[in-house]
Amino acid sequence: MKIAIYQIAIERDENRLAFQSLNHIISVSNGRVPVELYDCVFAGEVSAQTLEDIFYVFNMEHPSAYKGRSLSVSDVVEIFLASGGSEFYYCEPIGFKRIRFEKE
């Protein structure tokens, strides 16, 4: 599965949004996920079939090219589709929620 992972850059996180739920972030960020706070920390192929598999890989078996912290709440996973598009998922305290994420 081809994916990308985005994490909030702590040094730009003046409102301490890292590790917060989606509801909290959108309530203090004008109803959106503030893409400008995020950096891409991984892009590539992983041996995973589900978001839960991705969570496991990026917590227990980090790929050698991975430069981020363990996958956690407030991180965004982009899944590249065979059709050429992609979908974005926000890591919640329990599970993932599909979101709009207009990366730059």
Image (cartoon, grey):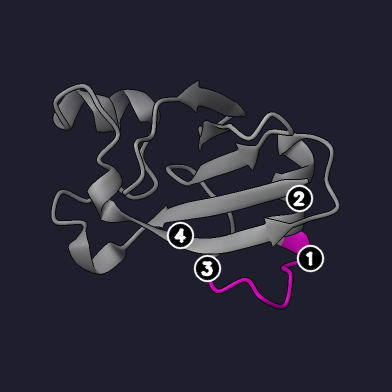
Q: In the image, what residue occupies the spot 56% across and 43% down?
A: 77
Spatial separation of the CA atoms under disc 3 and disc 1: 13 Å
Query: Can residue 62 be found in the magenta stretch?
Result: yes
- Give, as a three-letter code, the residue at label 2: Tyr
Pick the residue in front: 45 or 93. Answer: 45
Three-letter code for the amino acid on which mark 4 is drawn: Cys
Q: Horizontally, is 15 left or right of 1 in the view? A: left
Give whichever of discs 3 and 4 has the lower sequence position.
4
Checking the image for residue 56, the label placed there is 2
Q: Label 4 belongs to which residue?
A: 40
Residue 33: quadrant of the picture? top left
Query: Left of 5 or right of it: where is 31?
Result: left
- Which label was assigned to residue 73? none
Q: What residue is at 15 percent from the left and 49 percent from the top?
A: 15
In the figure, is residue 79 to the left or right of 14? right
Give the residue pinned by disc 3: 68
Spot occupied by residue 24 in the image (x, y as percentages of width and height): 28, 28
